[in-house]
Amino acid sequence: MIQDPNAITITDKARQKVYDLMSEAEISPNHYFVRVGVKGGGCSGLSYELDFDDESQNGDMEFGDDSLKIVCDMKSFLYLCGTELDFSDGLNGKGFNFVNPNAARTCGCGESFAV
């Protein structure tokens, strides 16, 4: 299967963490999806957003597969195309990481970026 290089993807480790969080929140991946986005702010100018959602909006881009859907609004997709969502639980920090090929620089916390 050929993967679209512009797609927003998720690593196996991040996928498992999403399933764990959904289970803790007692929500089903059959009804909810992961919404990723970008908003202005943060120490580098733009901040990442990550949440669960159950309502698609007009113009949303959809990625993922039958078991887990990732959704992004069109404006945010311009900044996030080709991004991989990862999860780290190492000594250098714990949490979701956006591996964004469009980011010219990121802040030390990894929660904001600039293009």
Image (cartoon, rainbow, N blue to C red):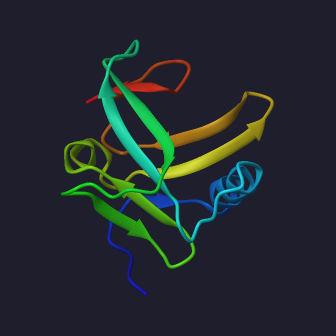
Q: Quadrant of residue 41?
A: top left
Q: Nearer the viewer, residue 11 or 49?
A: 49
Picture layout, residue 105 above or below residue 38: above
Q: Is residue 61 left or right of residue 55?
A: left
Residue at figure coordinates x 56%, y 40% from the top left: 97
Q: Is residue 92 left or right of residue 114?
A: right
Task: Determine if residue 2 is in view.
Answer: yes
Looking at the picture, how far across and down is residue 50, in whole percent? 49, 41
Looking at the picture, how far across and down is residue 63, in whole percent? 39, 66
Q: Quadrant of residue 68?
A: bottom right
**Which quadrant of the figure contains the C terminus?**
top left
**Residue furthest right as drawn:** 91
Residue at figure coordinates x 32%, y 46% from the top left: 80
Q: Nearer the viewer, residue 104 or 18?
A: 18
Q: Is residue 32 left or right of residue 87?
A: left
Residue at figure coordinates x 56%, y 20% from the top left: 109
Task: Determine if residue 6 is in view.
Answer: no
Count of marks, rendered view: 0
**Residue furthest top as drawn:** 43
Q: Nearer the viewer, residue 17 or 104?
A: 17
**Which quadrant of the figure contains the N terminus?**
bottom left
Looking at the picture, how far across and down is residue 8, in whole percent? 39, 58
Picture layout, residue 111 above or below residue 60: above
Picture layout, residue 36 above or below residue 66: above
Q: Nearer the viewer, residue 19 or 109?
A: 19
Looking at the picture, how far across and down is residue 32, in whole percent? 52, 60
Q: Is residue 31 left or right of residue 76?
A: right
Q: Quadrant of residue 101?
A: top left
